[in-house]
Image (cartoon, rainbow, N blue to C red):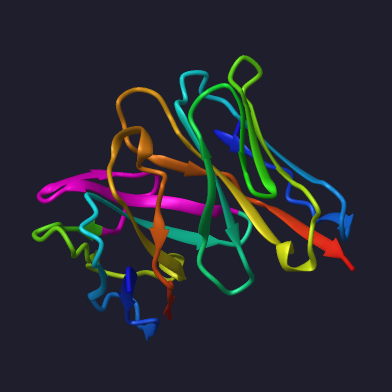
Amino acid sequence: EAQVTQNPRYLITVTGKKLTVTCSQNMNHEYMSWYRQDPGLGLRQIYYSMNVEVTDKGDVPEGYKVSRKEKRNFPLILESPSPNQTSLYFCASSPTGGGRAGEQYFGPGTRLTVT
Amino acid sequence: QKEVEQNSGPLSVPEGAIASLNCTYSDRGSQSFFWYRQYSGKSPELIMFIYSNGDKEDGRFTAQLNKASQYVSLLIRDSQPSDSATYLCAVIRSGGYQKVTFGTGTKLQVIP
């Protein structure tokens, strides 16, 4: 089954404790992206990747890191989480980038709470 | 001014009616436009994309793009209660970037 998977689905952590949210897709997609979704603010793009070893900042990259060492995986790293990073996080992938980057398949989401 | 704007709703329509959802964008050079549906507690799901001025139809859904007026709309014909969801408009802006910018979504309620 073609899908985007994320782990963990739920995470409660404390301020400053480094964490990684994994994302994997089995569709051989080139483009991958991370979003956070907050009430009243909608979906906001954190980082995106056009291909292996090629990443770029989205609209809200502060406090996050990403890497793309393999085509299928795109982990999101929070080096020192803070309470304002409490949010619902989605990973997404698209067959290709450019003007078609928005043809995305979304993962199930990770609900992160930072206390 | 927000880059992508949508009325948050809720938009209530009776079953069988046409639901019309609108989205405006600020970057005149934006090139690609997408509509997603998101049920409560679920992930967004792509339902339509449109790249050229005019209409694009897929089943009960029609996307309309007017670049001169900088708006894109989604029409849902014969609305069903199962269409009740939040509809998100997304845009890829100009400038060679591949950022995807979403509006905050319009909540649609289809009344049986």
In the picture, the quarter occupied by the C terminus of chain A is: bottom left
Rendered position, B56 above or below B43 = above
Looking at this view, name the residue that lies furthest to the top: B68
x%, y% of residue A91?
35, 63
Could you tell me which residue is drawn at 41 percent across and 64 percent down?
A90
Rendered position, A75 above or below A98 = below
| The magenta stretch spans residue A50 | yes
x%, y% of residue A86?
45, 71
Could you tell me which residue is drawn at 32 percent across and 74 percent down?
A1
| The magenta stretch spans residue B67 | no
x%, y% of residue B70?
62, 23
Query: How many labels sit on residues?
Result: 0
Question: What are the residue bounds of the magenta stretch?
Answer: A41-64
Q: Is residue A60 visible?
A: yes
Rendered position, A13 above or below B9 = below
Could you tell me which residue is drawn at 58 percent across and 19 percent down?
B67
x%, y% of residue B105?
64, 51
Q: Is residue A61 visible?
A: no
Q: Nearer the viewer, residue B18 or A47?
A: B18
Q: Nearer the viewer, residue A95 or B88?
A: A95
Could you tell me which residue is drawn at 25 percent across and 61 percent down?
A27
Q: Quadrant of residue B14?
A: bottom right
Q: In the picture provided, is A24 more to the left or to the right than B61?
A: left
Q: Quadrant of residue A9?
A: bottom left
